[in-house]
Image: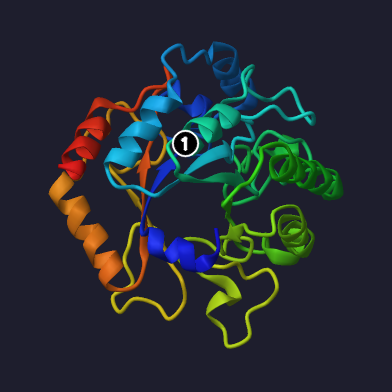
Amino acid sequence: MNITEFQKSRFGLFIHWGIYSIPARGEWVRSNEEMKEEDYIPFANEFDPDLFDPHQWAKLAKKAGMKYAVMTAKHHDGYCMFDTKTTDWKANHDYVREFLDAFREEELKVGLYYSLLDWHHPDYPHYKDRHHPERNNVKYDKPICFSNYLNYMHTQIKELLTNYGKLDIMWFDFSYDNMTKDVWDAHKIVTMARTYQPDIIIDNRLEGDGVHPGTIMDAHPSFTAGDFTSPEQMIPPQGLPIPWEACITMNEHWGYCAKDTNYKSAKLIIRTLVECVSKGGNMILNVGPDARGQFPKESIQVLNEIRE
């Protein structure tokens, strides 16, 4: 997919899914509650989504008018939804491959989300890192070898780029504080992506986040600026002079949250999409499947209403 095709696609599906669907309090549950590793690990042992059917997901997306989909291969908790050789902190099934196969069958473009953060890896900053669940635990006030983490992360990204056929989008998330760009060795990441997947497009979050775009808006963007920017939960009032994609949730969470029933109406979502398109942007609409691998019934209802 080139950037022109991306801009013509306009409407996509975001899927945030992982073991955080078991506690069902959103994908940031471990950080928000400063949950210890030993309390989070059991969710991996329990994860057995017996109703997982990516073909149903793909059909719902296509009927709703979506042209592409992006799923979490690894979120901030570090748990991998794909068959990586780097760690045992992964699903016992390659959910990424099944997602890609099912959506390609429906002729939708496909992408993978990959978190630069990793709350599981021992060499990712813990103590005093703004987001890490153990940020206030002085036990982790000790040296780490961040180069070990970088090697681990780059190896996983290479696996995704080389083991899963043609990818249209690589969606990295996210940079913050001093954890940005050169800290990630982003030049190497982009070089890998351009080498192994020459037609891929990349978001801007090797340098920024959902609010701060990095250098992509500059007169002379850097090599690692990305191909499009990704405002989160908002639409730029005047649009933007570069390709952009508004990331929008159906309710108030990305990952499955059982108590969050504050769903937007199909009418509001359609109006939001129209506003994005009228201002030259895309909209990627999120669904957070539950622990059994099903889209919440409210999400299914909204998608069905959108297609009508």
Q: In the depicted view, which residue is nearer to us: 213 or 43?
A: 213
Q: Percent x, y for residue 273?
A: 26, 58
| Residue 64 to residue 87: above or below | below
Compared across the picture, whether 306 is left or right of 146 comes to left
Horizontal side of 43 relative to 156 (left or right) equals left
Q: Residue at x 51, y 13 (%)?
A: 48
Residue drawn at x 72%, y 46% as measured from the top left: 125
Question: Can residue 21 be seen by looking at this rendering?
Answer: yes
Q: Give the image location of residue 128, x and y in percent.
A: 65, 49
Front-most of residues 163 and 15: 163
- Tell me how many marks there are: 1
Q: Amino acid at mark 1?
A: Phe
In what element is the residue under mark 1? helix
Q: Residue at x 62, y 57 (%)?
A: 200
Image position of 167 (left or right of 66): right
Q: Position of residue 220 (x, y in %)?
A: 63, 85
